[in-house]
C-alpha cells in the first residue's frame, strides 16, 4: 500500500506519520521501519527497497521524504510503482508536490493521497481548546484566539507553546501568554514599521 502525505501543515503530517508508524509497529514490531530522504537513495537500490521482505523483516514500513525533488528517482519510482510488494507499506512525505507532474497524477490514481493544509483560524481555535484539554489544562475561547495571534497559524509552534504554558500553569490566561510566548516575528516587524 502506498500513502502520500502532502501539504504545508508539517504538524499534521508528522502526526499522521506517527499514527501510521505506530499501527505498523504494533502489528509487526520495530524491525521493519525504515526512513529515507530521497537524496540518500541511490537509483539502483530503489527496486530492492520496494521489493518486499528482507532477511530481518518480513513486513516493512518505508518512509521516503521529498521523492518529487529527485527527478531521476521519481521517474524510476513511476516505473516501479505497480510492483511495490504487498509486504511493504510505503509512505511518501511530500510537503509540496507539483500537481502537473506525472508522479502526482500516478499517485493520485494508484495511492492514498492525503493532503494536510493549514487550518482556518476558527478551526484552529477549537483545536487549541481541545489540545489544552487533552494535556489537562484549561483555556477559554478568547484566550485561545489570543494565543493564535501570538503564534500565528503554525500548529507545530502552537503545540509547543501549549505544552510550555501548561507546564507553567495548567490554567492558561492572557497574562501567562504575554509573559511566556514570544510574539509572531511578522507581527513584530509590522509593529516596528508602524512606529517608524
Image: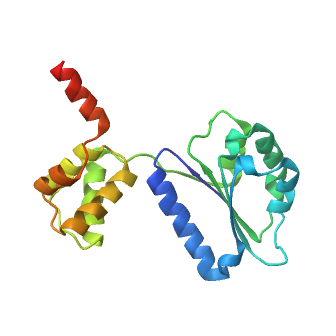
Residue at x 61%, y 40% (from the top left corner)? 97
The quarter of the rendered structure image containing the N terminus is: bottom right
Number of numbered tags placed on the structure image: 0
In the image, 193 versus 137, the foreground residue is: 193
Left or right position of 27 against 17: right
Residue at x 25%, y 42% (from the top left corner)? 183
What is the x, y in percent for residue 23?
57, 75
In the image, 49 versus 42, the foreground residue is: 42
What is the x, y in percent for residue 127?
30, 58
> Considering only vertical position in the picture, is 155 above or below 190?
below
What is the x, y in percent for residue 58?
79, 78
Q: Is residue 105 at least partly visible in the picture?
A: no
In the image, 182 versus 81, the foreground residue is: 182
> Considering only vertical position in the picture, is 56 above or below 118?
below
Q: Is residue 189 at least partly visible in the picture?
A: yes
Left or right position of 166 against 68: left
The colouring scheme, among rainbow, by chain, secondary structure or one colour, is: rainbow
Q: Quadrant of residue 52?
A: bottom right
State the residue lying farthest toward the right: 44
> Considering only vertical position in the picture, is 158 above or below 104?
below
Q: Quadrant of residue 171?
A: bottom left
Residue at x 67%, y 81% (from the top left corner)? 28
Left or right position of 114 against 191: right
> Considering only vertical position in the picture, is 112 above or below 195?
below
Residue at x 85%, y 55% (from the top left corner)? 45
The quarter of the rendered structure image containing the C terminus is: top left
Amino acid at each position: 500500500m502506498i500513502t502520500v502525505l502532502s501539504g504545508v501543515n508539517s504538524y499534521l503530517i508528522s502526526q499522521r506519520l506517527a499514527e501510521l508508524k505506530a499501527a505498523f509497529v504494533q502489528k509487526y514490531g520495530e524491525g521493519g521501519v525504515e526512513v529515507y530522504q530521497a537524496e540518500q537513495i541511490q537509483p539502483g537500490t530503489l527496486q530492492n527497497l520496494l521489493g518486499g521482505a528482507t532477511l530481518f523483516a518480513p513486513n516493512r514500513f518505508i518512509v521516503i521524504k521529498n521523492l518529487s525533488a529527485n527527478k531521476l528517482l521519481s521517474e524510476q519510482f513511476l516505473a516501479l510503482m505497480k510492483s511495490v510488494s504487498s509486504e511493504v507499506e510505503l509512505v511518501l512525505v511530500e510537503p509540496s508536490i507539483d500537481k502537473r507532474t506525472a508522479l502526482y497524477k500516478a499517485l493520485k490514481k494508484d495511492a492514498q493521497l492525503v493532503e494536510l493544509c493549514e487550518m482556518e483560524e476558527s478551526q484552529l481555535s477549537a483545536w487549541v481548546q481541545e489540545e489544552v484539554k487533552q494535556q489537562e489544562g484549561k483555556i477559554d475561547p478568547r484566550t485561545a484566539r489570543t494565543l493564535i495571534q501570538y503564534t500565528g497559524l503554525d500548529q507545530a509552534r502552537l503545540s509547543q507553546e501549549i505544552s510550555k504554558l501548561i507546564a507553567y500553569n495548567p490554567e492558561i490566561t492572557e497574562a501567562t501568554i504575554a509573559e511566556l510566548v514570544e510574539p509572531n516575528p511578522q507581527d513584530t516587524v509590522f509593529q516596528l514599521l508602524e512606529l517608524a
